[in-house]
Structures are given as C-alpha cells and as structure tokens.
Amino acid sequence: MTLLQTQGVHHITLNGADRQTSIDFWEGVLGMPFVFEQPNLDDPEVNHLYFDPGDGRLITIFTSEDRTADDAANPNDVGNLHHLAFIVSRAVYTQAAQRLKDARIASSGEIDRGFMDSIYFRDPLGQLLELACYKFDPPQGCTHADVLHEAHHLRVKAGAYNIADVHLADAIEALTRKRAGTLSEG
C-alpha cells in the first residue's frame, strides 16, 4: 500500500458551548488570538471559531448559543481524546501553575516527564489540556522528534525506564556529530 504521508497537524476542532465561553478561555486564558469565525459549513446553526495556538496552525471550536458549559471531566474511554498538549516556553512554564490558580483553574502542578515538564488542567468543558515544556533545544537543523528518536535508542540500549537528561545530552551530541562531521581522528 502506498502511504498517505502527513506533514503535520492542520487543525483540531472541539465541540464548544456558547461563543463567549470559548473566547474567554482560548484567548483570555491561553492567549490564543481569535483570528476569524464563520458558520459551520456542515451545519449553519453552529458557529465556527478559529484560534491560533502560536504556530500559525488552528484550534477551532464549534459553538452554539443554546449550549451551556459543563466542566465535568470528558470520558476517558477507548476512542475518546485523552488530552491536548500545547508547547510553552520555559519562562511561561515557570509561571503557569500560579497563573492558572489566579484564573481559578485547578491544575496538576508541575510534573517531570523526563524529557519535558508538564502541567495538566481542564478547559471549561471538561477537556484535559497540558502545557508542555521541553527540557532541551535541538541542534541546528534537527527537530525535537529527531532528538527524542535518538534518545529512545540510547534509553533502550541502557535498559532505562524512560528518557532522562543523560539520554537527551548524548542524543544531542550524536546528532551534532552526524550533522557537522569532523576531520579530527578519534
């Protein structure tokens, strides 16, 4: 079979409640500019809001004024979305727990994931969200995925449970060496 090769996430669409709840949360709490809106072209009774999560791609929300927000946790069943993760800078990450608290949004607090740090919280409709901050910058010309792929091989070879700083540092060194090369012997 010939693959249908993807090139990244185009957009993610969530079912929202009323229009203002979405604007207040996605732009007012998470700082995603509200870039445009139009009717849902499959259902003109539903509005379609578009937000920029920071990379020029889109998070879109279907809204209707007859819907009300329900912050009960969304189902965690097979086939359902578990969570959405958004990348943040180290500077934003260090402020996230307090800023969520100031906005009266409960969070998990800071969690160390080995290769990244995370904070989890729910949107006004019960969807679990994550703010994630990588613990490393990839070498020039490489991506975070390149480093994590290399670190995975190093982790497995070492018999380690998860990717740790040592695997990241060694992966960055290996990728830099492959990319740049050297005329030195040994």
Image: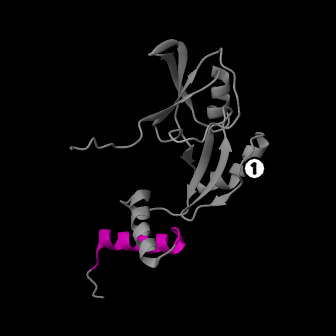
Image x and y of residue 43, in percent: 48, 14
Toward the bottom, the furthest residue is 186
User: Vertically, is 2 above or below 65?
Assistant: below
Q: Which residues are magenta?
A: 161-182
Magenta stretch contains residue 172:
yes
Image x and y of residue 75, in percent: 61, 37
Provide the residue designation for mark 1: 98
Residue 11: in sight, yes or no? yes
**Is residue 169 left or right of 95 when viewed as pictured?**
left
Toward the front, the furthest residue is 78
Residue 139: in sight, yes or no? no
| Colour scheme of the rendered structure | one colour
Image x and y of residue 39, in percent: 50, 15
Residue 64, quarter of the rendered image: top right
Q: Amino acid at mark 1?
A: Gln
Helix, strand or loop under label 1: helix
Predominant SS of the magenta segment: helix
Toward the top, the furthest residue is 45
**Residue at 76% across / 39% down in the picture?**
103
**Residue at 68% across / 56% down in the picture?**
94
User: Vertically, is 8 above or below 143?
Assistant: above
Residue 145, quarter of the rendered image: bottom left
Viewer-nearest residue: 80 or 7: 80
Viewer-nearest residue: 138 or 69: 69
